Image (cartoon, coloured by chain):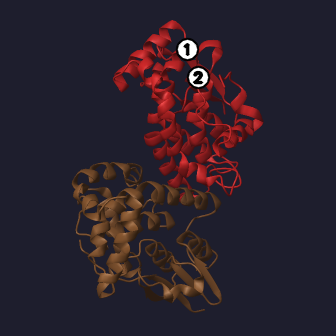
Chain colours: A brown, B red
């Protein structure tokens, strides 16, 4: 069955869409390769069929699945390695998803939002600036200016994830699973859009991110990055 | 094989030891009933055999298992319902454990530390006051005085756990598992030692805590509480 993944595309065909990286890795985990279709952040006419304006969207034959969590649930029903490892694993992956989306992403976004505009054409950059400045109530330059200070607290927020890596190579255990893809996605987004070092090289999470980039035939390295 | 659980005991035999509630529920989950032995916080001679001064300690025949997480892992090897549901579930339970211990407990403890001294005799109360005032660098009265303000941010911290309950009755899914016991333990500690309403009655987590109290034959209601 033909699979298509709609995601954001920027300059030089950079695929920078944060949540799309969860879907990309979940597909690869199941041994599936979709056709990737870029969508402009300032012009969502390509996904008008979905009657909403958010990516990622997975088209699986006749089915249209929107939202990275729903895509993961949809893919879990397919053959191949499990993304969750059963009901408890799926429930706690959902908790991990909430933690990353409510705690990590909102503190990461202001530090790199200005840099996102650097990998977009003028029209997309203007659109994103409008959305982000409205959300944060500040010019993107002002948000970026305090990041040398903000990064300290941000890195500390990651402590519970970092603690996982003391005894095992992945957040999910001896092998990567969907929880790894959840946390990888904002950190992958950061390295694609920004030269700012979100993780120090001495950080266990930095080494883990490298391992994540190598997975599935180096899937994470298939789009240009700035660090 | 005889099982013994050492845990803190207070006035009127209140069993208020935070992490012990994880071990109590994990034992019940496996259908096991230990002999409970109280230890005074100011006099740990009862557990001198363990060559350290922390509870809970589980004695399982010849084995001495200390630390709630190690106790859970030890019990998982026994027959009966799984506490974790496999490797991914166990890994993410460990993440959940880190999140609760690093994020939730340190913000809860200052709000109710003064009340803990109210369920202890003079000697234990003096001991705990010394430890807590050293840890927080403030008199317990001062910590308690700001709790009407502090509780607002504390309740918000619980949002990722609260989100779990939108679609399912337990943190772990349709049935309770170890992650539920992890979060239950500080909230159970709070209700045993303090009349301060940590959770509002309209909160999904309040209703969940009631469900948790009812589990395993009402195990959570076997010690006197203040709310």
Q: Earlier in the sequence, mark 1 or mark 2?
A: 1
Residue drawn at point x = 41 percent, y = 54 percent = A161
Q: Is residue B226 left or right of residue A197?
A: right
Given residues B101 and B143, the one toward you in this image is B143
Kindly identify which numbered label has been placed on residue B118.
Answer: 1
For the point 65% across and 43% down, the residue is: B203
User: How crowded is the residue under tag 1: few (<14 C-alpha within 10 Å), some, or many (20+)?
Assistant: some
**In the rendered image, is residue A34 in sight?**
no
Depicted B65 relative to depicted A47: above or below: above
Q: Position of residue B125 (x, y in %)?
A: 49, 12
Q: From the top left corner, tell me how far across and down residue B76 is, in percent.
A: 60, 47
Marks 1/2 in contact by CB < 8 Å: the verdict is yes
Q: Which residue is mark 2?
A: B193
Looking at the image, residue A137 sits to the left or right of residue B41; the answer is left
C-alpha distance separating marks 1 and 2:
8 Å
Q: Residue at x 31, y 48 (%)?
A: A153
* Quadrant, the C terminus of chain B: top right
| Residue A17 locus on image (x, y percent) | 41, 75
């Amino acid at each position: 069955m033909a699979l298509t993944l709609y995601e954001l595309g920027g300059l030089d065909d950079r695929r920078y869409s944060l949540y799309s990286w969860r879907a990309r890795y979940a597909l690869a985990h199941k041994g599936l390769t979709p056709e990737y279709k870029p969508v402009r952040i300032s012009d969502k006419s390509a996904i008008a069929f979905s009657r909403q304006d958010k990516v990622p969207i997975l088209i699986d034959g006749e089915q249209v699945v929107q939202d990275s969590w729903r895509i993961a649930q949809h893919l879990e029903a397919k053959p191949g390695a499990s993304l969750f490892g059963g009901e408890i694993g799926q429930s706690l992956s959902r908790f991990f998803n909430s933690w990353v989306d409510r705690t990590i992403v909102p503190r990461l976004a202001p530090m790199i939002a200005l840099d996102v505009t650097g990998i977009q054409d003028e029209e997309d950059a203007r659109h994103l600036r409008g959305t982000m400045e409205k959300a944060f109530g500040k010019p993107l330059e002002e948000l970026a200016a305090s990041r040398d200070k903000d990064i300290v607290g941000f890195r500390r927020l990651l402590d519970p994830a970092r603690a996982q890596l003391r005894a095992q190579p992945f957040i999910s255990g001896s092998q990567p699973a969907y929880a790894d893809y959840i946390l990888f996605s904002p950190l992958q987004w950061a390295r694609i859009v920004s030269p700012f070092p979100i993780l120090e090289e001495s950080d266990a999470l930095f080494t883990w991110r490298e391992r994540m980039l190598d997975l599935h035939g180096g899937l994470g390295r298939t789009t240009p990055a700035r660090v």
